[in-house]
Image: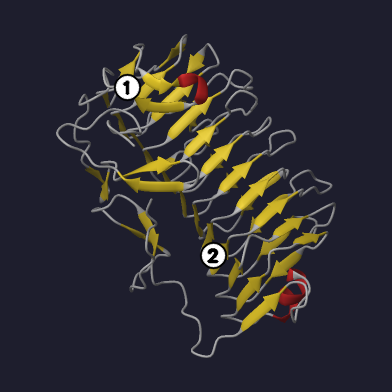
Amino acid sequence: MTKLSFPLVLALSLFELSPVTGSITPSGAQSPAPAAHRILQVGPGKPYALPSQAAAAAIDGDIIEISPALYARDAAVWRANGLTLRGVGGRPHLKADGASAQGKAIWVIQSDNVTIDNIEFSGARVPDQNGAAIRAEGEKLIIRYCYIHDNEMGILSGRSNAEILIESSEFSGSYGDYNHNIYMGNIRKFTLQFSYIHHASHGHNVKTRAGTNFILYNQIMDEKSGSSSYAIDIPNGGRSYLIGNVIQKGPNAENSSVIAYAAEGATNEWQELYLVNNTVVSDFGRGLFLNMHVTPTQLLVTNNIFAGAGVALNTTTGTHHNLVERDPMFQSRATYDYRLLPASPAIDAGSDPGIAAGFNLNPQFRYVHPLGHEVRKIIGAPDLGAFEYPTH
């Protein structure tokens, strides 16, 4: 299993789009910490007993190191820029138990250029029922190696010029009417990669209104007991890349469609959808794999596996080299192991999807459960779906 590196290079955006690797990495726009940056230590026996105390003391460029303990009923607003907030020696757990910052979230991030690393959040509840583990209100936020579960909202964002990257993180168990594991507002750019998003209740596993979306190499699932609405909802369209994901709708879902595009109006600047090398499974028994309320100006649906009795792919525009209404011959559908058996008709059945708006659409990685990834090695024609045969 490999992890992406994060080179410090000059760029105008928080995230560097690589046409070579077809993946997203943070770029050097994030403000470097001062040469004499401070480290604030949080935890039992440390200078700051609670994260909220460190938040009140933090200045630009600080590194906040949080020891692995249970921090119950502690909520905070972070205002200093260029912060790194990380669990050290294990994963600290912020359990809301009714507490919130500004009636919004366990953590409200009002600052820019913030990284949240290796922290667990749970139990966010507020009177308006939009209680989030993290409310993202600044620009340029990275969340990685975090476990965010059993909140009304996992993450809820604002700020139209924001760019947010979530990677190698787990979101589960959002609950309440129309609440979501991940909800991105009308931000500039959203990237989700190498993550496990599952078991939303009533709302969507992933909902994003971002102008540009990169949803790459994730596992997005209801499994048996999840009751999400859409697996992925892109309600205002946008330039959206969905590549190399494993996406499953469960039998108890609340909507028959798996992926929805522009369901609330095609109001984003770009209307482009690139759905490439995904394994999309519906166990619902009816409905649509892809429900497009507006046909994008650029549409490519290729090299995917669509598996599910009674579920249709209702578009032919930009659609080719997909496996639909045939048994893909998974290793074990019952246990959600969608790797291919040796006789699968998906093997060597794909084609080169090319490049779109400077981004390489060929899958470069595959998701490795849990929360990992490895390089996808293609010999000859690419296989359909999220996995290349053989996989180990």
Spot occupied by residue 141 in the image (x, y as percentages of width and height): 53, 62
Which dot, 2 or 1, sits closer to the camera? Answer: 1
95 on left or right of 59: right
Density class for disc 1 (Cα within 10 Å; few <14, some 14-19, many ≥20) is: some
Q: Is residue 279 above or below residue 148?
A: above
Q: Amino acid at mark 2?
A: Glu
Q: Earlier in the sequence, mark 2 or mark 1?
A: 2
Outermost left residue: 380
Residue under label 2, please give it: 139
Q: Is residue 251 above or below residue 318?
A: above
Compare residues 340 and 281 and report the one nearer the observer: 340
Q: What residue is rendered at 53% in x and 11% in y? A: 285
Rendered image: mark on residue 131: none
Compare residues 229 and 223 and report the one nearer the observer: 223
Outermost front residue: 392
- Per the image, label 2 sits on a secondary structure element best described as loop
Image-quadrant location for residue 225: top right
Outermost bottom residue: 36
The answer for how far apart the CA atoms under marks 2 and 1 are is: 44 Å
- Per the image, label 1 sits on a secondary structure element best described as loop
Query: Residue 228, can we see it?
Result: yes
Spot occupied by residue 350 in the image (x, y as percentages of width and height): 22, 28
Residue under label 1, please give it: 341
351 on left or right of 24: left
Q: What residue is rendered at 73% in x and 58% in y? A: 94
Query: Residue 234, can we see it?
Result: no
